[in-house]
Amino acid sequence: MGMKQNIGNVDKIVRGIGALILAYLGYAVSPWFYIFAGMLLLTVFFGYCGLYSLLGIQTCPLKKK
């Protein structure tokens, strides 16, 4: 059972913007926000979200054969 991509392009953009906001909050408010920003960036880079897999959600378009 491998990690198949389950995050689409729009979802990646939204997560990337969220990571930037959280990184700023980590700088301005508390370093704890850096952890959440890092988690979002990892999901963007790998295209995989474990929570989506558990819930059966997939925002990545299906590839035609």
Image: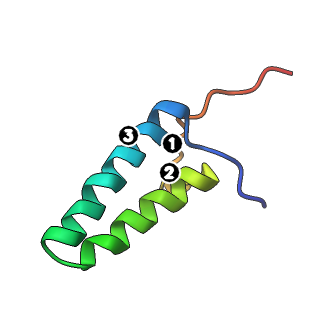
Indicate the quadrant where residue 37 lies: bottom left
Q: Earlier in the sequence, mark 1 or mark 2?
A: 2
Vertical order, 20 against 36 (above or below): above
Image height check: is 11 above or below 21?
above
Q: Which is nearer the eye, 47 or 58?
A: 47
Residue 35 is left or right of residue 42, and the answer is left
Quadrant into which the C terminus falls: top right
Q: Residue at x 71, y 57 (%)?
A: 3
State which quarter of the image contains the N terminus: bottom right
Res 7 → quadrant: top right
Could you give the CA–CA distance between mark 1 and mark 2, rounded to whole angstroms? Answer: 5 Å
Q: Are marks 3 and 2 in contact (CB under 8 Å)?
A: no
Residue 52: mark in rendering: 2
Where is residue 15 shown, x and y percent of the image?
A: 40, 47
Towards the viewer: 55 or 15:
15
Q: How many badges with numbers are in the image?
A: 3
The type of residue carrying mark 1 is Ile
Kind of residue at badge 2: Tyr
Answer with left or right where residue 38 lies relative to residue 45.
left
Of tags 3 and 2, the one toward the viewer is 3
Badge 3 local density, few (<14 within 10 Å), some, or many (20+)?
few
Mark 1 Cα-neighbour bin, 10 Å: few <14, some 14–19, many ≥20: few
Farthest residue to the left: give it: 29
Q: Residue at x 23, y 61 (%)?
A: 24
Q: Which residue is mark 3?
A: 14
Front tag of 1 and 3 = 3
Is there a contact, CB below 8 Å, between mark 1 and mark 2?
yes
- Are the two marked residues, 1 and 3, in contact with CB atoms closer than 8 angstroms? no
Left or right placement of residue 5 versus residue 2 in this view:
left
Mark 3: secondary structure: helix
Q: Label 1, on which residue?
A: 57
Q: Earlier in the sequence, mark 3 or mark 2?
A: 3
